[in-house]
Image (tube, coloured by chain):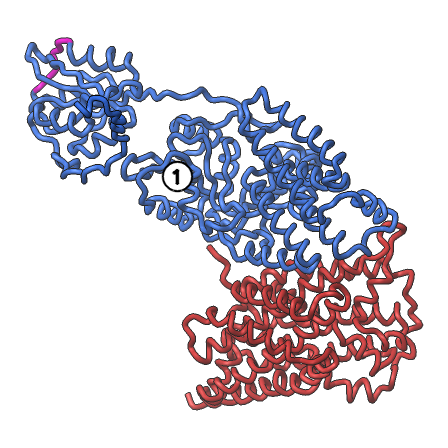
Chain colours: A blue, B red
Amino acid sequence: MNNFFKFTPPKPTRPFKIKKSPITKEPLYDKKASISNSLKDNVEKMKYFLHYPINSDVQCREFNIRINDVSYPATMFFYDGLVDSELINNFLLRQFMKNTNADVSNGIKDAILTDILAQNQVKIKNNFEDIISAVVVGNCIVFVDTLNIAIICDTKKLPQRAIDKSENEMASRGPAEAFVEGLRNNTGLVRKYVKDQDLIFEDIPIGNKAPTTCTIAYISSIANDSLIQEVKRRISSIDVDYVLDIGQVEQLIEDKTYLTTPLMLTTERPDKVALHLFEGRVVILLSGSPNALIVPAVLVDFMHTSEDVYLRYPYSLFIRFFRLPALFFSVLLPGLYISIVTFHQEMIPTDLLFAIAGTREKVPFPLVVELLIMEIAFEIIREASIRTPAPIGPTLGIVGTLILGQAIVSANVVSPILIIIVALTGISSFAVANFSLNFTFRILRFFYIFLGAFAGFFGISLGLILHACLLVTTTSFGVPYSSPYVPINSKLGESDLASIPIWKQEERPNFLKPKKQKRQPKISRKWIINSKER
Amino acid sequence: MNNEKLNVWEIACTLSIITLTPVILSFPQYSAKRYGSASVLHAVYLSVLILIFFSIVFKLYKPFVGKDILDISEMVGGKFLKGISGVLFSLYLFTIVIFTLEEFGQNIKNVMFTNSTIVQINMLFVIGMAILAYFGIKGIFRIGSYILPIVVIGFALMFISLTSKMDLTNLTPVLGTGAKEIFLNGAIELGIFNSLFILFLISPFLGDIKKAGFSSIATTSGVIIFALFLLSTVIPTPSLNQKYFALFDLTRYIGFGRFFQRIESIFTFLWIIACFLFLGSALTFIIVMLKKIFNWKYPNRLIPCFTLLILALSNLIPNYALSSAVRQFLYMKVAPILLFLYPFILLVIARIKVSGERVEK
């Protein structure tokens, strides 16, 4: 009774806590096992491997194959959503289920393959491992009673977007198509540009848990054999559970992980891939990735854009010429500014020196803090503008750059001249053609700011020499990264800082050691000779 | 696919940089003081001498392609002589590095960081030196091939900008302090080209030592003569005699209109890069030689030890005058004997030995 009047607080409910999973039991069936003659047996194993019926998109369709009025029980497995249902209904099930007068004297297997199946791509496999890797990519598997094989029919219809314009590598001249996620679409696009029977696509699966097809493309009559072997060696030795994008493959096969500079070219343009294939490089494509990797890559390659080769010589020379100062400003301008203003004031003309000193008069921070505030703000604005939804992007740009810039100067947090420096640096970084190289410069800029603030030109020269040393000792798939300039290489091909007229590009870059050095004869414009003869 | 050998351009550029960097420090003043208006003529004379000397040496070296000077020492006197030679060469380089580092540091302190201590400046130098040494011979030589063209362009710009200030009468009297002084006593200054000795250390990395050697001599001599010509024509010999870091002072004369009035810092910028290269390569060669003598498996692990030792010893030098005097002594007195005469004798004996073996066969 006492307890009746006494308040007892409710017992706290036991909070949910994730438990440690029990150690996975030994699998019931071995994937490497061979297919048996018993349909029941095979179906049971397949259901176990594909987690049927828990797995809702796995379809198991039982039916009878009718040949000469005799029924043969069969079962079909496929993943709904990965296959073309119409194809399965009209060209598999309909064909199997209607009574045919096929010749079974050579066995039912031959009868199915030669008389019944109206399919262009059919494979026969006799172990579960191969079958499973086929069904997960959208194929349809058929087991027939009494046959110790499985028939794999190509019924893939993966959900994917249509081929569209390149968004990250825009060009005013040249083809506009870009890769999509479908591997075969991408190989088709490459073959569309490289109409050469020597173009080879070799498939290597990557991933133990979920194998993804990785394709190595090269022109066998041009690309160096040792380069091809090295690419194959690196890719086939990758031992990971899965890869989803080519960016992960890049990280798994690159020569130096901690180097900020990219060691492989990434592109979404099939025409760029084609150009590099013709030079003797190797291209790596991955199923599900809309980008291709081009190897080996040298530093100069990152400074070119896709349209450089399509533009007339004077134009491409002109734009390449302006990319160099952009590159210089992008990396070194803030560092040099801080060096000159802090340590080498004598370099600044007197009038300008007074102007700089006047604008900095009311700023309470040291120059390095001022510069870091602006650079960090710029990086944040840039990152935010990429992440924000497209309609808000321009607003963010206006708020970030104009309003914030104006306010920060009015509040005397930074001097106006610094806004010019940071803006010029930022704009220059956008002129750098490659996305990865752009990243590199953004990182290095901070490095040079610290060195400049610490020891002026002394610090910058220390940074430059170490950076240069790092670049000249780096290799990308055995090719010196600073080629064709260090070591000096007379045959530059397209890998030149300056542009070469197309009729002068007689040789492929010899740092690639291609099988065919000559790209075109010395006189590729034969009409010139004809004109002279006239 | 990697290019294993160093090419002629890389060698010529880097050796020129390594030779010129310390020479530029004090040689112009020294030369002006000793030979007066004939300093350019003296440099030309030294260039001819070094060319003749190396022509003979390359002839002697012919049967030993792919072998460095330590291998040749081993051929002559077995492992003992190889060890002795290696230690002597390393010791010379080690001493040169210590005194040059101090001299570099003092110069930078005077022209750039008057408020910093010499230890702080030297520390920055040795950081660069150690990291460069980690990259090894190939890294250094490939970097050199970038830097020399920049230096040469710098000199060319200096020449263009100083044309109006040049006075060719500064080169007269042509024989300066006298023919005997230039052609007889002056021959000992062949030591300024001591870095060319490195050719015999990197010979295993070379394709054609003769081509590489002559290209290096031509480039080095060319730049020295050009630097002295600029100096002598712009600054009269008596004033040059008083200068502290003459080439730096020369850059102070440069000016383009109202905007580019003082651009000497750019010269310092280029010169510091060259200093890093000099120090880095010297440490690399010390490590390479000691590795070869003592069969070290992991020589790079000793780079920090050597770096700290060099920094510590350079800090023991009390003043600039001493470091300059010792370096001068090493260049003028030790280098001609140790780096030119000694290898020459080794080559002669080795050649005789090889010829004897051939006759026996």
Image quarter (top left, top right, bottom left or bottom right) of the C terminus of chain A: top right
The residue sitting at 18% across, 23% down in the picture is A52
Q: Secondary structure at mark 1?
A: strand
- Pointer 1: what residue? A216
Residue A209 spot, x, y in % from top left: 27, 37
The answer for which chain carries disc 1 is: A
Say which quarter of the image contains residue B47: bottom right
A2 displayed left or right of A274: left
Whether residue A103 is in magenta: the answer is yes
Q: Main secondary structure of the magenta part?
A: loop
Camera-side residue of A338 and B353:
A338
Residue A108 spot, x, y in % from top left: 10, 21
Camera-side residue of A305 and A456:
A456
Say which quarter of the image contains residue B275: bottom right
* Residue B229 at least partly seen: yes
Q: How many marks?
A: 1
Q: Which residues are magenta?
A: A98-104
